[in-house]
Amino acid sequence: QVQLAESGGGLVQPGGSLRLSCAASGSRFSINNMGWYRQAPGKERELVATITSGGRLNYVDSVKGRFTVSRDNAKNTVYLQMNTLKPEDTAIYYCNALWRSAGKWGDSWGQGTQVTVSS
């Protein structure tokens, strides 16, 4: 089993920046895709950005040019740099990882971190 621990959320003014981090821990695993999802009040969870083990990136259109996803494979950590934040970015942000351990694939979620964009 792989556990994910997120950090970096908070309150920021419109136009500001935040950086989220998510570290994976466990025993004898390798991670394939990592990414970030978000869920705003009254809305379904949506994909924000993903990155494969090879560095292939994918973003939802609404964050392209403002958010950057990256990862440190040696630390099993994925980051989300969020710039030019807008009130509509307010949501709980969840980290996700697709991993393999002992010949089996698994899928883990973090506990979520609140991002609030407000003046």
Image (cartoon, rainbow, N blue to C red):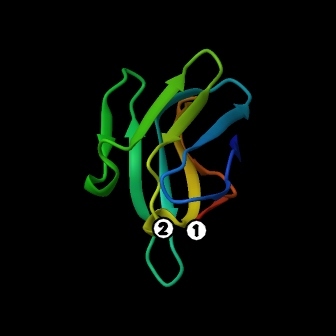
Under circle 1, the secondary element is: loop
Rendered-image quadrant of the C terminus: bottom right
State the image quarter where residue 33 is shown.
Answer: top left
Left or right, 53 with reference to 96: left
| Spot occupied by residue 69 in the image (x, y as percentages of width and height) | 44, 35
Residue displayed at 65% across by 52% down? 110
Single out the residue that lies furthest toward the left.
61
> Which mark is first along the chain, 2 or 1?
2
State the image quarter where residue 17 is shown.
Answer: top right
Disc 1 marks a residue whose amino acid type is Ser
Residue displayed at 39% across by 45% down? 49
Residue in the foreground of this view, choosing between 34 and 66: 66
| Spot occupied by residue 30 in the image (x, y as percentages of width and height) | 56, 25
Left or right, 92 with reference to 25: left
The answer, for residue 95, to whether it is visible in the render is: yes
Label 1 close to label 2 by CB (< 8 Å): yes
Residue displayed at 58% across by 59% down? 13
Disc 2 marks a residue whose amino acid type is Pro
The residue that disc 2 covers is 87
The residue that disc 1 covers is 118
